[in-house]
Structures are given as structure tokens and as C-alpha cells.
Amino acid sequence: MHSFCAVFKRELKSYFTTPVAYVFLVVFLFFSGYLTFKQGFFEIRQADMQAFFMNMPLLFVFMVPATSMRLWSEERRIGSIELLLTLPITVTQAVLGKFLAAWLFSQ
Amino acid sequence: MISVKELRRNFGSIVAVNGASFNVEKGEVLGFLGPNGAGKSTLMKMLACFLRPDSGSATICGYDILKNPVEVRKSIGYLAENVPLYNEMTVGNFLNFVCDAREIKGNNRKQALDRIVPICSIESVYHQSIETLSKGYKRRVGLAQTLIHDPEVLILDEPTDGLDPNQKHEVRELINNMSKDKCIIVSTHILEEVEAVCSRAIIIARGEILVDSTPEKLKEEHQCGLDKIFRKITSTKAA
């Protein structure tokens, strides 16, 4: 459990120590706003968020790979996977830790 | 403490380790010698439960590397050859992460950090991010990571590579000091290091153990320096 928390905490922190995460967040926010208001949000004169939620899947198509694809490939590239998998952590704990960190980040 | 039986590992058609067997007891410092590509690192990676052997088995501190890898990892400290670290973290954060993963908490963690930071002389870079460090400092941080939980078994893959002469000397002293109550495996290309720290030496070439002896015995048998012996053994049998 502790080792799972360790991976989780480290991953989540690492998103915010590099500027990449902020860039993606800002781009995501910009497009979610832009796509919502683009199709005449005010002209429809209805209090619904359909325009917002309709575009979410499209945005997530870009957002999800951007946050998740580096999780394992980066470890492999730097070689730190050798460190991670020789700490007393099971693969399941490492996968869950990374997954939840990326999940929370995308929320 | 370590017993290895017929470990074997292939990478495709290349045989990396071909049936290695040996035992290491507490208090011994075992040196792995061998030309490049001999299988030293592969063997160490298997002992650290990073690679799975194709066949054979090994136990470390009574735990089987295949059946109980987490317990094995708890009782060993492993320093990989290229010293993988998380570059974006600071040294302090990184060591705290390792403590988290190894479940060293509260007061124990403070003690462990207070003990290890001066030993590896990384006080001056403690708050610096790892990517800005020189190779030698990175290696020291790696060493700190390896020693932080005071493991019974140490597996060090070329621990002095990239260090300056003073640091090399310090690392050797460190290994000598720890050797009494630990079981240490070191791989190296530097033969003087074997004489300086190892109580036993294994020469590997092409994945096979060619010699398992002490440095003194080797010198006595061959009546020449270690480098000559090394060349003789690895070149004749590999050819």
C-alpha cells in the first residue's frame, strides 16, 4: 500500500515539475471553452451544457494520450524502470499508482 | 546468503548467461570480472529480480527470486550500471521517494537520511535537481539510494565508474567498512579494485563462469599480475 502511494505521489508531482503539464492544461481549457461557445451558445437561448459535453470526447482524444503515454515509455527511455522494478514494488502497484496519478491529473 | 543454481538467460539467439552457479556468504565481497558482454550485468539484473531467468534458480537471504521477488528486493540494495534516477526530482525528493517505496517512515527516515547523506557526500547538492548534477554526483545519489535501507545484500554494477580518484577511494573504503556484516557483489573492469576490495573473484566470459577463486590464490597460481591473468583466461577460452 505504501509503495503504491509512493509511486502515485511521485507521478503526480512529476506532472507539475515540468512545464509540459501546464501547457496541456491551458491548451485543454482554451479549446474546451472555444468549442463550447463557437456554435452560438447564447443564440440557442437554452440553459444546457450540451455544447460543452459534446466536445469533451474529442478533446480527451488528445488529452489522454498526452498525459498517459509517457508514463512507461519515459521510464524505459531513461532506464529508471530498472530502479522502479528493483524497489520492493509489485508491477500491479506500480501500474495502479501511475494510472491513478494520470487519472487524477486529467480530472 | 546468496545461492545461485544454474541460472540461464538468452536474448534471442544470444546466450547471455549460461548456467551460472555459486554461493556467497555473509562477510564476503565477490567481484565479477569479465570482458564487455560477458553477462555480468545480466546476471546481476536477474539477482535483483529485474530480469527473469529462462531457467535455474537463486535464493537471496532465503527468498527465492522467482517466487518471492518483493522480499528479495526488500533485502537487497541494487545499483544499476547506468544509474537510473528520476531526473526532474531534486536529490532530497528522490531519496524521500525511495524511503516511501521502502516504507522507511518518521524517525527512521530522518536517521537513514542523516546517515546516508554524509556517507555519500551529497549534502551540497541535496536541494538541487538531479538533471543538473555531474555524472559523479549522480552516481553518489544512486549509491545513497542503494544504501538507504541498510540492506544485507548489496549488488553494485560498476560502482566506481565515473567517479574521481578521491571518490573511488572513498567508495572502496565504504565497501570495505560494510563488508563485515553484509554480503556484497561488485562488478568491475578495474582490476586493482578487485585487489583492493574483493575477498573473492569470479571471472566470466561468454556467460560462463571460468574462474572462482580469491585474488591472492589467482596470483599465486599464475605467478603474475591480475591483468595478465585476466587476459590469459578470457582470451584463450573465449577464442
Image (spheres, coloured by chain):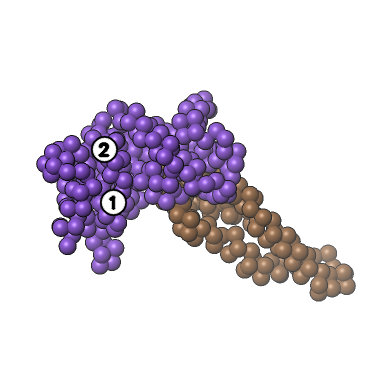
Chain colours: A brown, B purple
Where the N terminus of chain B falls, by quadrant? top left
Circle 1 residues within 10 Å: few <14, some 14–19, many ≥20: many
Where the C terminus of chain B falls, by quadrant? bottom left
**Residue under the image location 50 percent in, 42 percent down:** B137
Q: As rendered, which of B37 and B112 lies closer to the eye? A: B37
- Give the amino acid at mark 1: Lys
From this view, report whether residue B205 is shown above or below residue B117.
below
Residue that mark 1 sits on:
B40
Residue A40: % across, % down: 84, 73
Subunit bearing disc 2: B
Q: Quadrant of residue A68?
A: bottom right
**Mark positioned earlier in the residue sequence (1 or 2):** 1
Horizontally, residue B73 falls left or right of residue A61, namely: left
Subunit bearing disc 1: B
Q: Quadrant of residue A52?
A: bottom right
Q: Secondary structure at mark 2?
A: helix
**Residue under the image location 53 percent in, 54 percent down:** A99
Report, in whole angstroms, how far the alpha carbon at label 1 lies from the one at label 2. Answer: 18 Å
Q: As rendered, which of A102 and B79 lies closer to the eye? A: B79
Instruction: Mark 1 vs mark 2: give the one in front.
Output: 2
Q: Are marks 1 and 2 on the same chain?
A: yes
Circle 2 residues within 10 Å: few <14, some 14–19, many ≥20: some
- Give the amino acid at mark 2: Glu
Q: Secondary structure at mark 1?
A: helix
Q: Which mark is residue B67?
A: none
Residue that mark 2 sits on:
B195
From this view, report whether residue B18 is shown above or below residue B151.
below
